[in-house]
Image: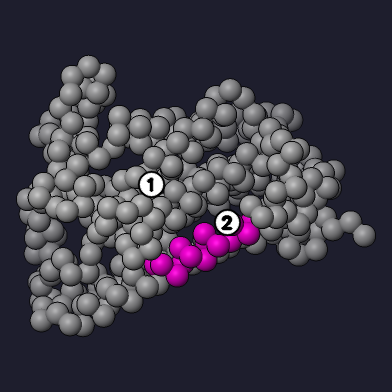
Amino acid sequence: EEVGFEEASTSVAFINETDTERRARVKAEMDAAVIGDAKSKVIMERLKSEEDQDAGLSSLLASFLTFLDPSGTVRRRLWTRADYMHIHAVTGAYFLFLGIPWLLWSHVANAFDTSVPMQTSSPFLTSLLLAGLINALSAVPMSKFSSNKMFDMRDLKANGFTFGGTGLTTMCLYIAWWFSGDYPDFMRPFDIPIFLFWALVCAGTTANWEIMLQQNFEANERRTRKVPEKEMRQKAILYRLASWPNLTQLSFMYSIPFGGLAWLQQCEALWPMQSTPMYHYGIASAMGYALSMFSETLRDRKLVTLEQDLLILIIGFCFPMVSVLLDGLTYGSAVNISPPQYWALFGFGHLG
């Protein structure tokens, strides 16, 4: 799942409460929250209300959640029937909790020996990309909040999970695959239509967030007891940080279909280690989106607050930029991280 924003009609707040009172109220509401609805017409809401108590491997994996939270709240709200065979949870744990340490270690290893480019192709890295892909795709069946139909465009919250989460994570995995050295030649003729598809996903996601934000503000104006202005500002930042920056991905991706292999070879001729930051950018972006998906799921299940969710989203947003910056500091003149100098969008790599 990707974006667990509360429906506007269900958000209740007291405009005159202090920050301390608000935090106490939010904690009390989260502690008392009931996830899912056993009587809902939406099947996924019924499944969310059922904790998976099966024995065997499922019980073994779930015991880790009990270890983290002996009260059982985390397990009860996350380990449910909504996640078929817990494919989403297992692949997400593999992708994030092995992938992020690997990314951090890759920077450390590069710093110790700058003569060797970071490995971008190996059985482990392939498994990492596949785990990220399965994790993203397995969120789609769970992304049903007001309808039993998959890809119901009227369910804006579901659109956030499917297009803003699954779509954008998959897009960045594609970027990492393209720069990994394993991208097959037979795929290159399809780079332009693939780019156009991702452009549609990015634009649609941005429009979806803006519509959701507008609906939240309009609903708040109709309330007798309005949501505090500070909370509405935080939601606006959250929505827009999860939407508009996605369009910048397209300016980088432009180099793939309209620069192609010739563009990449020209980059590597000038900057021998150039594939490293570009691969890092792709996989770190995918991890950033997956991390924000995880955070939004936690907020949907009332396990993190709006402020905590916003903080995690900011971390995910900065993740790829920090990774590329570290590559620039590590490799120096062997890489170029200045977009005007190497992106095909600005004219570099177009053969005359």
Residue placed most toward the observer, 307 or 63: 63
Type of amino acid at the residue the image marks with label 2? Trp
| Residue at 55% across, 24% down | 124
What number is the disc on residue 198?
2
Residue 275 drawn above or below residue 235: above
Q: Earlier in the sequence, mark 1 or mark 2?
A: 1
Asked whether residue 203 appears in the rendered view, the answer is yes
Res. 29 image quadrant: bottom left
Res. 258 image quadrant: bottom right
Q: Position of residue 134 (x, y in %)?
A: 45, 36
Q: Residues within 10 Å of mark 2 (few under 14, many from 20)?
A: many
| Residue at 67% across, 42% down | 178
Q: Is residue 295 left or right of residue 260?
A: left
Q: Residues within 10 Å of mark 1 (few under 14, many from 20)?
A: many
Marks 1 and 2, how far apart in space? Answer: 17 Å
Secondary structure beneath dot 1 equals loop
Residue 339 lies in the magenta stretch: no
Type of amino acid at the residue the image marks with label 1? Val
The colour scheme used to paint the residues is one colour
Residue 253 drawn above or below residue 272: below
Residue 299 drawn above or below residue 14: above
Circle 1 residue:
140
Secondary structure beneath dot 2 equals helix
Q: Which residues are magenta?
A: 195-209
Q: Is residue 95 left or right of residue 341?
A: left
Q: Position of residue 6 (x, y in %)?
A: 23, 61
What number is the disc on residue 81?
none
Q: Position of residue 14 (x, y in %)?
A: 10, 72
| Residue at 69% across, 37% down | 183
Asked whether residue 238 appears in the rendered view, the answer is no
